[in-house]
Image (spheres, rainbow, N blue to C red):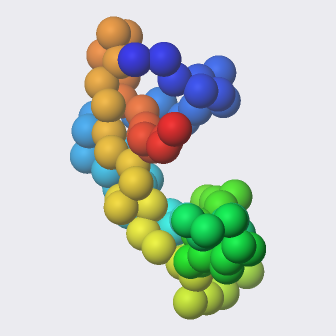
């Protein structure tokens, strides 16, 4: 598996440490409307889509909950590397 931005990743000695790191973070997505054309070629407004997610630490003093927050655990899981270290990995669509 090819990892994006691996040089900036945080590594952990145990799976539990990595899972704890994931549990203290949320993803906040921007929402956008998907535009397109219907089957007749007419302009159509589509559904809201998630875009441009940012990760926030929920234990930070300046963190404020919003309705767009989702647990990082919905998207990330611990993965053990060949070095026997653990890293949180998010699966990307596309």
Pinpoint residue 23: horizontal percent, then vertical percent.
38, 63
Pinpoint residue 66: horizontal percent, then vertical percent.
61, 88
Residue 66 in sight from this viewpoint:
yes
In screen coordinates, is 7 left or right of 91?
right
Pinpoint residue 45: horizontal percent, then vertical percent.
67, 79
Is 87 or 37 nearer to us in this picture? Answer: 37
Residue at 36% x, 59% y: name it: 73
Is 53 or 48 nearer to us in this picture? Answer: 48
The vertical placement of 76 against 36, above or below, is: above
Residue 83 placement: quadrant: top left
Residue at 56% x, 77% y: name it: 47
Residue at 59% x, 27% y: name it: 4
Is 73 or 49 nearer to us in this picture? Answer: 49
Residue closest to the far front: 40
In screen coordinates, is 56 left or right of 69?
right
Residue 43 placement: quadrant: bottom right
Pinpoint residue 92: horizontal percent, then vertical percent.
49, 41
Residue at 40% x, 54% y: name it: 75
In screen coordinates, is 58 left or right of 22?
right
Residue 32 in sight from this viewpoint:
no
Residue 69 placement: quadrant: bottom right
The vertical placement of 87 against 58, above or below, is: above
Q: How many marks?
A: 0
Q: Quadrant of the N terminus?
A: top left
The vertical placement of 86 against 63, above or below, is: above
């Amino acid at each position: 598996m090819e990892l994006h931005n691996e040089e900036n990743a945080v590594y952990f000695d145990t799976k539990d440490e990595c899972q704890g790191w994931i549990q203290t973070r949320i993803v906040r997505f921007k929402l956008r409307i998907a535009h397109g054309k219907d089957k007749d070629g007419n302009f159509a407004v589509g559904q809201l889509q998630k875009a441009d997610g940012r990760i926030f630490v929920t234990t930070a003093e300046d963190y404020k909950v919003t309705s767009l927050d989702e647990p990082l655990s919905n998207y990330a899981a611990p993965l053990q590397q060949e070095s026997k270290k653990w890293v949180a990995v998010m699966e990307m669509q596309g």
